[in-house]
Amino acid sequence: MKTLVRLVLGLLVLKVAVANPRFSRQADLDSYDDGNYDVDDINSENQEYDYEDGPTIEDPEASLEEQEEEEEELPLKPQLIPQGSGGSGVLMGPDTQKGMPTCLLCTCLGGSVYCDDLKLDSIPPLPKDTTHFYARYNRITKINKSDFASMNKLKRIDLTANAISSIDSQTFMGLPELEELVIRENHISQMPALPETMTLIDASHNNIDSKGILKEAFKDMTGLLYLYLTDNEIDYIPVPLPDSLRSLHLQRNNIQSMHEDTFCNLHDFNYIRNALEDIRLDGNPINLSRTPQAYICLPRIPVGDLI
Ligand SMILES: *[C@@H]1O[C@H](CO)[C@@H](O)[C@H](O)[C@H]1NC(C)=O
Ligand SMILES: *[C@@H]1O[C@H](CO)[C@@H](O)[C@H](O)[C@H]1NC(C)=O
């Protein structure tokens, strides 16, 4: 009986659509817009980074809701899953330890793999062509060297808000395209070694002290723009800083003093460090008035106590 009613209703709708071509064209346009809008939306929401004001802390619950929406919508929109060259292995990515393909567990869109809020306790195996990987708000405790082995296209890794306490030190060194690493809000005490291709490093809200940062760790990163290390236990500003650096955020650490040539070059008064316009040292036990020569080459004096 129900089927019959549906059939009759369906025929009626069809009839209206046929009789009124404008109605049917409008309906097509609507669904077309819908599909496209979702792709843009998901991409811009997740890849956007608020460079001006530093990273914004996302509300885990809001993010949970987003994720649920995505999951509900996806099965209805198979066209959003990137088309592989055939075979479900290519389409769905490699299998996780629990035997489920990564792109069934996570959301794969183009080169981006989104695994936010999935109670993951390790990094899932990623499709070879992954460029952006997100696994925020999970329960990952350890990063293995093998987790990102030969991921030659990976540009961005975001592991915000997990429980990571150890990262194999060479994990990221074999990634030729890596530019952005976000490991904020974890329990990391040792910064991993990073390739020279980095443009953004965010390791804020961890347990990193100065012994946990390799000597001259950032020196050769000639394209580094953003270095965020707020809310750690760092005692010294990590020098030398590359000339490319725009933002250095070190709020709420344990920095008590600095050298007069931390930023500038006291042997060369013509040296100007134009790019570094955003230095945050507030919340450190340092008296910036003690090193008046330290800022002469900067476009702006660091934010901090001048007492
Ligand atoms: C890390 O790798 C070892 C083998 O090298 C493996 O036994 C272990 O399960 C891996 N841990 C995670 C969290 O993947
Ligand atoms: C900060 O340094 C300035 C210049 O050396 C000094 O006059 C001032 O007393 C210092 N303030 C504190 C709280 O140590």
Image: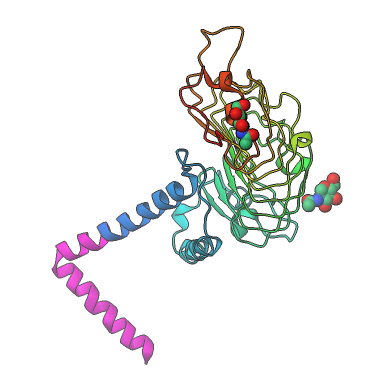
Rendering quarter of residue 191: top right
Q: Quadrant of the N terminus?
A: bottom left
Q: Left of 55 or right of it: where is 214?
A: right
Q: Quadrant of the C terminus?
A: top right
Rendering quarter of residue 192: top right
Where in the figure is residue 68, as x and y percent of width and height?
51, 66
Q: Left of 66 or right of it: where is 267?
A: right
Q: Is residue 10 above or below residue 158?
A: below
Rendering quarter of residue 171: top right
Q: Is residue 19 above or below residue 180?
A: below
Q: Start and end of the magenta stretch?
A: 1-28
**Which secondary structure class fits the magenta region best?**
helix
Q: Residue 12 in magenta?
A: yes
Residue 193 is at least partly visible in this image: yes
* Residue closest to the eye, 164 or 178: 164
* Residue closest to the eye, 276 or 236: 236
Q: Residue at (55%, 33%) from the top-left corner?
A: 306
Residue 197 is at least partly visible in this image: no
Q: Is residue 287 above or below residue 124?
A: above
Where in the figure is residue 98, as x and y percent of width and height?
74, 61
Q: Left of 167 or right of it: where is 281?
A: left
Where in the figure is residue 277, as x and y percent of width and height?
48, 28
